[in-house]
Amino acid sequence: MCGIVAYVGARTAHDVVLDGLRRLEYRGYDSAGIAVLDGGSVDVRRKAGALGNLEAVLEAEPLAGSTTGIGHTRWATHGAPTDGNAHPHVDCRRALAVVHNGVIENHSALRDELTNVGHVFGSQTDTEVVAHLLEEELDGPPGGEGQAAQHSSSRTPEEFAEAMRRVCRRLAGSFSLVAIHRDFPGVVVGARRNSPLVVGRGDGEAFLASDVAAFIAATRQAVEVGQDCVVLLTPQRLEITDFEGNPTRGREYRVDWDASAAEKGGYDYFMLKEIAEQPDAVAATLLGRLGRDGTLTLDESRLDTRVFVEVDKIVVVACGTAYHAGLIAKYAIEHWAGLPCEVELASEFRYRDPILDRQSLVIAISQSGETLDTLMAVQHAKEMGARVLAICNTLGATIPRESDAVLYTRAGPEIGVAATKSFLTQLVAVYLVALYLAQLRGTKYGDEVAGVVRELAAMPSKVAAVLDTMEPVRAIARELARVPTVLFIGRHVGYPVALEGALKLKELAYMHAEGFAAGELKHGPIALIEEGVPVVVVMPPPSGRSVLHAKLLANLQEIRARGARTIVVAEEGDEAVRPYSDHLVAIPAVPTLLQPLVSVVPLQVFACELAVARGNDVDRPRNLAKSVTVE
Ligand code: M6R
């Protein structure tokens, strides 16, 4: 949820850290802060609110020109988003500073223990216990002479790393931690458990961050830090150990996108840029999947093909938009591969007693690969013996690493909090998995699989065609900017699309929006319909499963008869809906199962435009952050 960046090198640390924070601000924007080493102490600036507030503080009270620094952009969990709760946090001596992403679950007991030996806390955060625990390890209780006074010049960086290991062994919960200490100039120590941390290795400089976006302008060479590991970093040196001190290696990789991918590129919002990038993102995710012989290959999946053949049940776990992709996966997997498929919110999955065994394949969908609920569901599934396939957009993230196999989507960095291009690429990925299962299990012939892959290959141009015709959708959105509620209905794969349209509107426009399965209308929701209530209707293709179209047409007539203002998303040339549509949004003809790839696009544009018309910042909706790394 929060963004962390640390720098050691030859440049002015606070400039580099601030630049990194600008790229990480999407992870949290309640408050921000920077600490640098300044001779005999750490120098800290922190401020509630967006990063701009911190920049103003730095302007008024510049930091020292240190070459070792850490920074943080916060999404508050413990303690309100105030100046005092903003990170970095310091110890009693102001000898060290620490930033944290995650939740320290046993912070309350630790705080009592530390207070009893004289530590004084300056914030309500769970994080501050780490600063004082490190102080205990490195310098002893406050008031004492401390190790520093005794032999500060002879201290080795290993001592700092060992202190972090000892602290980590005492912590419960999830954390990425990064710390600096006055006795260790040019050294940053970090740690992680169930929260991301990645090293960036530049020329004579090094970074430690929650996300490669923080250092992509300086280097594309990255090293994944494994679960339950401590990192010791200097400009030349990288040492990773587990919490017991056993050396371990991180996986090195080269980031395959550059800094421009994480910039707005002339758009007012990242979200607008990311919506526009969808045709390319879909095409990239499809690239190289169909072999010359017409068979589908999922090269990087790492799962033995026998697993796909022997599996007797699929369970999809995910949150938010990724969950909606999972709901669509169910239709494709059951239809093409003939396998039972359950879809469950990751946050619910782990607190019930799912029936899983070695024959079950769990598919965990996550753009960030960091969502804690999804990660916990993955761990739970593995404990039960199931195989886990991750669908993820972030190379080296925790969820793919903890899974047995991974299929990467290739959406590129998604900075806007609202998921857009990641959703379309997740859909492509679930279609590919469904087809792969069908191919290996023989429920579809090779030429049939190749046929669907060819239809998928045509989708980028169809999505582009939708994007070219969005001006009327924007106009409707502006007209509806002040309505109190918008409802969405759909059937079959149009139902998750309706849910997704409503989620986008809630998170961006802060208004009541709800998606329904159209068949459920008469079981309650139709009571909400009164004169002028806007209802977005996602119509299935008339020539697909015609019964679906007929049923939804009947629902459309019912709500129209009760006064609804209908905004109908329907295949071009679908004349049957015209008499019942106040606004008709035409989308290209595509096969029924693939229709979400085009039908969701107008709903994204609608939500974005409506939210902007209400004066909201669509990249940074209130109370939200891009990845939810806490429960
Ligand atoms: O990174 P993930 O895909 O695991 O994130 C899951 C949800 O938090 C995410 O899709 C969220 O619902 C989006 N903000 C919705 O636009």
Image (cartoon, rainbow, N blue to C red):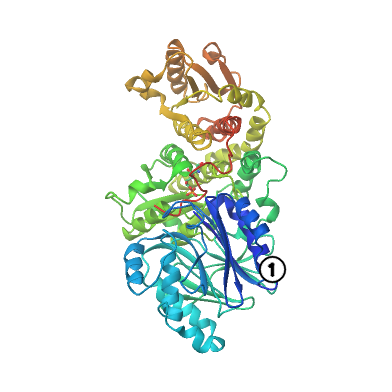
- Residue 551 image point, x, y percent: 42, 19
**Three-letter code for the amino acid on which mark 1 is drawn:** Thr
Q: Residue 356 in the image: x percent, y percent? A: 31, 52
* Residue at the image point whose x is 51% and y is 18% from the top: 566
Q: Is residue 397 visible?
A: yes
Drawn side of residue 162 relative to residue 51, left or right: left
Residue 292, given in percent of the width and then of the height, sits at: 63, 50
> What's the residue at 54%, 10% (across, down)?
579
- Please tell me how many numbered marks the rendered image carries: 1
Measuring from the top left, give residue 437's x and y in whole percent: 45, 47
Q: Nearer the viewer, residue 382 or 73?
A: 73
- Using the rendered view, name the quadrant where residue 584 is placed: top right
Between 395 and 6, the one lying in front of the other is: 6
**Neighbourhood count class around disc 1 (C-alpha, 10 Å): few under 14, some 14–19, many 20 upward:** some
Could you tell me if residue 246 is visible in this image? Answer: no
**Measured along the vertical axis of the image, is residue 630 above or below residue 185?**
above
CB at disc 1 and ligand 1 closer than 8 Å: no
- Element under label 1? loop
Horizontal side of 604 relative to 176 (left or right) equals: right
Left or right relative to 434: residue 354: left
Image height of 9 relative to 441, above or below? below
**Observer-nearest of 264 and 279:** 264
Question: Which quadrant of the structure image shows residue 37?
Answer: bottom right
The single residue placed furthest to the right in the displayed view is 266
Residue of label 1 = 12
The residue depicted at 66 percent of the width and 41 percent of the height is 273
Q: Nearer the viewer, residue 99 or 142?
A: 142
